[in-house]
Image: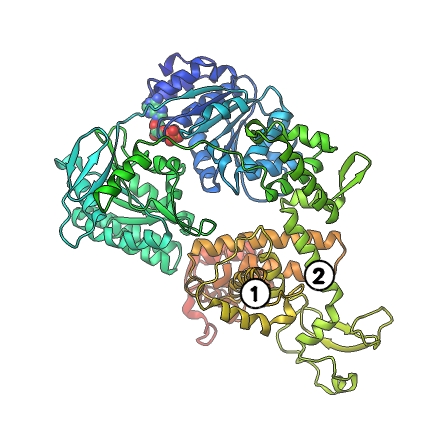
Amino acid sequence: RTADLTGLPTGIPEALHDEGIEELYPPQAEAVEAGLTDGESLVAAVPTASGKTLIAELAMLSSVARGGKALYIVPLRALASEKKAEFERWEEYGIDVGVSTGNYESTGEWLSSRDIIVATSEKVDSLVRNNAAWMDQLTCVVSDEVHLVDDRNRGPTLEVTLAKLRRLNPNLQTVALSATVGNADVVADWLDAKLVQSDWRPIDLKMGVHYGNAISFDDGSQREVPVGRGERQTPALVADALDGDDDDDQGSSLVFVNSRRNAESAARRMADVTEQYITGDERGELAELAAEIRDISDTETSEDLAKVVAKGAAFHHAGLASEHRTLVEDAFRDRLIKCICATPTLAAGVNTPSRRVVVRDWQRYDGDYGGMKPLDVLEIHQMMGRAGRPGLDPYGEAVLLAKDADSRDELFERYIWADAEDVHSKLAAEPALRTHLLATIASGFAHTREGLLEFLDQTLYAAQTDDPERLGQVTDRVLDYLEINGFVEFEGDSIQATPVGHTVSRLYLDPMSAAEIIDGLEWSAKHRTEKLRALAGETDEESASEREAEPEPDPTAGFQKASEMVSDDGDGDGSDDGDDELEFETDITYPTPLGLYHLVCRTPDMYQLYLKSGDRETYTELCYEREPEFLGRVPSEYEDVAFEDWLSALKTARLLEDWVGEVDEDRITERYGVGPGDIRGKVETAEWLLGAAERLASELDLEAVYAVREAKKRVEYGVREELLDLAGVRGVGRKRARRLFEAGIETRADLREADKAVVLKALRGRRKTAEKILEKAGRQDYSMENVDESDAPDDAVP
Ligand code: ADP
């Protein structure tokens, strides 16, 4: 019984009881018996929805009660705030909760006053690299979804982070939460932890396959769900769950599909089904919800979502804005939305139980695999585990779809009767080791090859491998790479990070990204004059005298920054050797924003956009047109792979160029075939990489630092350069900045002086917004009371 729990802060057992958690679930009880509340390390491998979060909470709270500090590592940024909100209910018992997201370069000293800290593994890794002092005070670390150590991209960071934390503090209690996997015992061995493994679920789960006119379940039962000729299975299953057996039995459905596009189109079809089941009251509430969705942003995705939500359905995928996602999840839990069509991201972590889960697609396109690849058992089981709402449903139903009897049998074999796969470390992959070895050297965890290997010996990789030689070989290759690029130095046996190496590690860059950026910037310094001349439309053959005859650049052309002086000492190499005589002036910034965007887009830290059909031609043409802007040699068309990558980076850079050219988000999503969430993602990554480039440029004393800073600011605000000042005022944003600018209010200073009626009119009559903006711009009398926008001169606001 929760009331009998000991070792927790005062009041918490009673609070749990009041929440309706009177008895521990069996796996939770087993964890407590294993010493969870006494600081014992533990791996809990139990199914979705069987109360893993409470296991984590009991460990963290008892650790805090003993005067310690706990860290909860989440796999996704979106989950960090969700978990923090969940843990904040303990604040009235004196537990302070903090979440650490954002800037990778900070140490988050303010977190030292928190008892429970929530962060992603990337963030924790960067905190370790930046030597956050409070790391030493940690007594308990929880790793949520630890089976993700198997993930090719993100697994190694989690693995190394756990190893480092445990090395910093050998008495650290490690609690790892995992889905049911094949080899949880290996994970437990690695972490020196006890293992709680169970198939127990709070609500029964029936798994089955729909084929023909019925679902066959794993318990041998069948449920008739007829599908009319020419109709599809999914809508029939969704309607069937909503029909229920009596009025109270209306059940919601989660439909899992394999792509965003499919999620959206399936949601449109399901909306026609759910619409028939909503009551008059619900219709009103859904209309309000749809309006709220449209308010969040005016993109096409937002509009599409609002349309289906009005009918009681929704889609959910990583391309959605996070505010949209939260609204959809909440409304689904409140039973207002009856069906969500989602990509598998929803299955990870977010608590959205549903009466029925339909796994429509069990294959997904995989580029490396070269075709449609069946999903892992683990992933399918996680989706299926979302079925069944405790207290609402008699049981949950999870259904796969088959077209014929053979594939029904295959699906039973492949997924329903099958056990989840083992997890395998992905640490030995070179990009992962490159990053983590530099960090391990830079943050002082190891100073010699032997020290590095000893540290690596504490990872899951070492626990799993039967080829200890291999780790040594890759380590040597990686050390070579780091030395050649100037990130580490050898002195006898000792290895040290160079100053640039330290910076790269603190900036949380893949060393390969850093090398690319440094090469690009140094290249641009070397070719500056020649490229500026090309950009000004000149060719090398043109003589200096012809140049002088050209008109001066138009001073009213809208450039505010100081003109750049370009010189050529006339020795024929087009470069400036120092003994210069000024030849001509130009307003062109070099490197150009496109050049810089392309540079950061071709690093391995940026996920590039794919080339679709026709893109190769479009971007090849663009590549030749804008050739002088690229920093570095353009690969020839015969270097197939390299050229293709170059073009993908160009496409991504063009998206950024559109963004800073103030192209509408809608236009951008259409032009590049992405969602609004993707634009945000690219923008945030570019901002981070340009910030890193700025740091590297200043450390290497490169003049490009100014151009980089401006390019970064423009990405941050999504504006042309003349709006940079205005858009920097909190609450303004790219659209409002443009409207203010067009009304003649061009700077922050103008905001302090301007006619309030004009401000109000430019802000479309939004008083609250106008007041907030004026206040942030530093205006004393920011009140909009008694201001009438019709007092603005007619032609003041176009
Ligand atoms: P998991 O993380 O394992 O997927 P959660 O921790 O989100 O599952 O738990 C699912 C739900 O079960 C939550 O709503 C939680 O409040 C509830 N729950 C957890 N433990 C208990 C318990 N002992 N008694 C009643 N409800 C519980």
Q: Quadrant of residue 24?
A: top left
Which quadrant holds the C terminus? bottom left
**For the residue marked with disc 2, what is the amino acid?**
Ala
Q: Which residue is mark 1?
A: 723
Q: Is residue 72 left or right of residue 238?
A: right
Disc 1 to disc 2: CB gap under 8 Å: no
Q: Quadrant of residue 83?
A: top left
Question: Considering depth in this image, is 35 or 479 the residue closer to the camera?
Answer: 479
Q: Tag 1, which secondary structure?
A: helix
Residue 401 visible from this viewpoint: no
Q: CA distance from mark 1 to mark 2?
A: 21 Å
Q: Which of the two discs, 1 and 2, labels the residue nearer the N terminus?
A: 2
Q: Position of residue 295 (x, y in %)?
A: 37, 55
**For the residue marked with disc 1, what is the amino acid?**
Leu
Q: Which residue: 70% across, 57% down?
A: 519
Label tally: 2
Q: Which residue: 48% across, 50% down?
A: 368
- Give the class, few, some or many, for how many residues have Cα within 10 Å of label 2's Cα (few <14, many ≥20): many
Q: Is residue 290 left or right of residue 219?
A: right
Question: Considering depth in this image, is 585 or 755 the residue closer to the camera?
Answer: 585
- Give the class, few, some or many, for how many residues have Cα within 10 Å of label 1's Cα (few <14, many ≥20): many
Q: Tag 2, which secondary structure?
A: loop
The answer to whether residue 687 is above or below residue 99 is below
Q: Position of residue 329 (x, y in %)?
A: 34, 42
Q: Which residue is mark 2?
A: 704
